[in-house]
Amino acid sequence: MPLWGLAIVLSALTIVVQQVFSATARQTAARVFRTDFWPAVQGLIFMLVLFVIAILAPLLAQHDPNVVNTSAFRNPPSAEHWLGTDSAGRDVLARLMFGARVSLTVGVAAALSAAG
């Protein structure tokens, strides 16, 4: 077989393989996004986002959640404090991020103690 014939066969084979795998990927995506599984997928995505935020809280938080700043007493949301500050002047977003760590730790510990 000449070299150009081999190139034609390989390109045809490549097109066939692409069509097979793209159809399989479409079928898999359709199966995942069906109405029976979609709420479970949404819950999984939400929990993964919470876990990532909780794990990366020290890196993501712009302010220390426990530092009291009396000059920032109950400030509304701003560029510096995205969710505002509480009655002690602490950053609400930082407190939520670090609070997620505690809540998820308690939830995982409760689930593990109930399972075992």
Image (cartoon, rainbow, N blue to C red):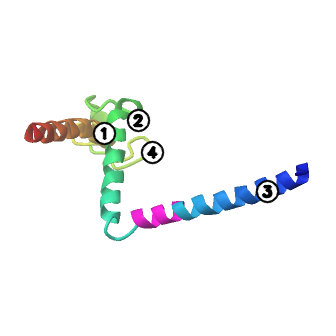
Lower sequence index among marks 2 and 1: 2
Whether label 4 touches label 3, CB < 8 Å? no
Residue corresponding to mark 2: 60
Give the CA separation, mark 3 to mark 1: 56 Å
Name the N-terminal-most of marks 4 and 3: 3
Hey, which quadrant is residue 103 in on the image?
Answer: top left
Examine the rendering and report whether any part of residue 84 can be seen: no
Q: Which mark is residue 97?
A: 1
- 104 relative position to 2: left or right: left
Question: What secondary structure is the magenta-colored segment mainly?
Answer: helix
Q: Earlier in the sequence, mark 4 or mark 1?
A: 4
Whole-percent x and y of residue 90? 28, 36
Q: Amino acid at mark 2?
A: Leu
State the residue at coordinates (87%, 55%).
5
Position above or below: 95 against 3: above
Type of amino acid under label 4: Ala
Query: Which mark is drawn over residue 107?
Result: none
The part of the image, by quadrant, that contains residue 21 is bottom right
Span colored in magenta: 25-32
Please tell me whether residue 100 is drawn above or below residue 59 in the rendered image: below
Q: CA distance from mark 2 to mark 1?
A: 8 Å
- Give neighbour class at mark 4: few <14, some 14-19, many 20+ (Cα, 10 Å): few
For mark 2, give the secondary structure: helix
The residue that disc 4 covers is 79
